[in-house]
Image (spheres, rainbow, N blue to C red):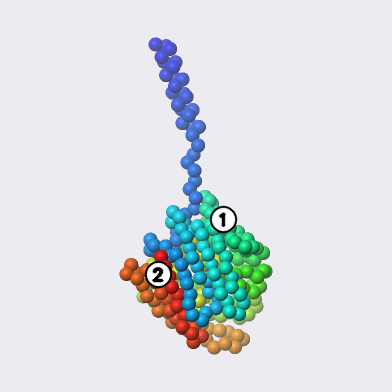
């Protein structure tokens, strides 16, 4: 009887040691919330017409995370830029591997949005409030994404979840103001406002926004943008009106507008 009792104690002690020595469950990798409220992810963005300085994109996903993107810029006054980007997620960060000589590193803030970004020697900083991008600044030191070397900054103001205005300036120039009027259409696909990537601070890496790494989407699609130039720019103020078409699932498939007297269309696939 004593032997049985001793054996039982040994077995119990061994079981307790085995239980206490188990490794803790692994921390899952980041899963950013993709912009928009639709369960269908955007796969491509393609521009047509006489337009400069816009990237076309192709996206791939796995387990509701963006894992790769291909961006293509055609600028008639410069040259075509094309690169691919691979995104790898860890429990605390995301690693971005680009084709060519674009070395990109990101630091995320507490809500897992990009706070600091370097591309080679270029530096970008982003600021958020209530999950939305409210300000940014960048210093371009190399020739990347088809942009010239400069220091630029922008602030974004919201009203009821929609962009109300953007203040954008370069170097020591007076700012240009972009006033946005929302449409009645909900932004279910989380689309960026057309023509404003540079002013929002994500020109050339819009895929980081679509990967859920640069803040929430606007509540509604943008209907009109009024551009107010400073006097020193010697440019006429103008506005851009946008029209949208959706498919039977209410996903936006087409955006059209007139820019500099030329028709432009943007096609979205899912």
The image position of residue 114, as x and y in percent, is 55, 61
Q: Nearer the viewer, mark 2 or mark 1?
A: 1
In percent of width and height, residue 153 lies at 59, 72
- Where does the N terminus fall, quadrant-wise? top left
Q: Is 58 situated left or right of 38 in this image?
A: right
Picture coordinates of residue 95 (x, y %)?
A: 56, 55
**Where 235 falls versus 223 (above or below)?**
below
The label number, if any, that marks residue 95 in the structure image: 1
Residue at image position (47%, 70%) is: 45
Q: Is residue 219 left or right of residue 84?
A: left
Q: Is residue 118 visible?
A: no
Q: How many marks?
A: 2
Classify the position of the C terminus by image quarter: bottom left
The answer to which of 64 and 85 lies nearer the viewer is: 85
Q: Position of residue 6 (x, y in %)?
A: 44, 15
Q: At 63% across and 69% down in the image, what residue appears?
A: 144
Decide which of tag 2 and tag 1 comes sooner along the chain: 1
Element type where label 1 sits in the image: strand
Relative vertical location of residue 227 with respect to residue 68 in this rendering, above or below: below
- Residue occupying the point 57% across, 58% down: 96
Q: Secondary structure at mark 2?
A: loop
* Label 2, label 1: how far apart the Cα atoms are: 28 Å
Q: State left or right for residue 114 relative to residue 35.
A: right
Residue drawn at x 56%, y 84% as measured from the top left: 229
Q: Residues within 10 Å of mark 1 (few under 14, many from 20)?
A: some
* Residue that carries the numbered disc 2 in the rendered image: 187
In the rendering, which numbered label is found on residue 121? none
């Amino acid at each position: 009887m004593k032997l049985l009792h001793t054996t039982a104690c040994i077995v119990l002690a061994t079981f307790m040691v085995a239980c206490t020595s188990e490794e803790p469950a692994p921390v899952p990798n980041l899963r950013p919330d993709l912009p928009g409220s639709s369960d269908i992810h955007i796969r491509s963005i393609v521009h047509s017409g006489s337009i400069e300085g816009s990237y076309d994109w192709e996206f791939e996903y796995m387990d509701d995370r963006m894992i790769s993107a291909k961006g293509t810029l055609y600028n008639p006054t410069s040259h075509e830029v094309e690169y691919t980007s691979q995104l790898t997620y860890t429990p605390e960060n995301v690693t971005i591997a680009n084709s060519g000589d674009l070395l990109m590193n990101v630091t995320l803030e507490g809500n897992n949005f990009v706070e600091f970004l370097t591309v080679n020697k270029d530096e970008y900083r982003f600021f958020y409030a209530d999950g939305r991008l409210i300000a940014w600044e960048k210093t371009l030191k190399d020739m990347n994404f088809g942009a010239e070397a400069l220091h630029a900054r922008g602030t974004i103001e919201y009203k009821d979840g929609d962009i109300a205005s953007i203040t954008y300036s370069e170097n020591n120039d007076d700012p240009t103001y972009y006033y946005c009027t929302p449409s009645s259409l909900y932004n279910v696909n989380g689309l960026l406002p057309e023509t404003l990537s540079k002013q929002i601070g994500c020109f050339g890496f819009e895929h980081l926004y679509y990967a859920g790494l640069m803040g929430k989407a606007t509540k509604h699609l943008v209907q009109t943008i009024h551009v107010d130039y400073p006097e020193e720019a010697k440019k006429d103020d103008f506005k851009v009106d946008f029209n949208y078409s959706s498919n039977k699932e209410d996903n936006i498939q087409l955006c059209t507008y007139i820019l500099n007297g030329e028709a432009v269309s943007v096609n979205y696939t899912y």
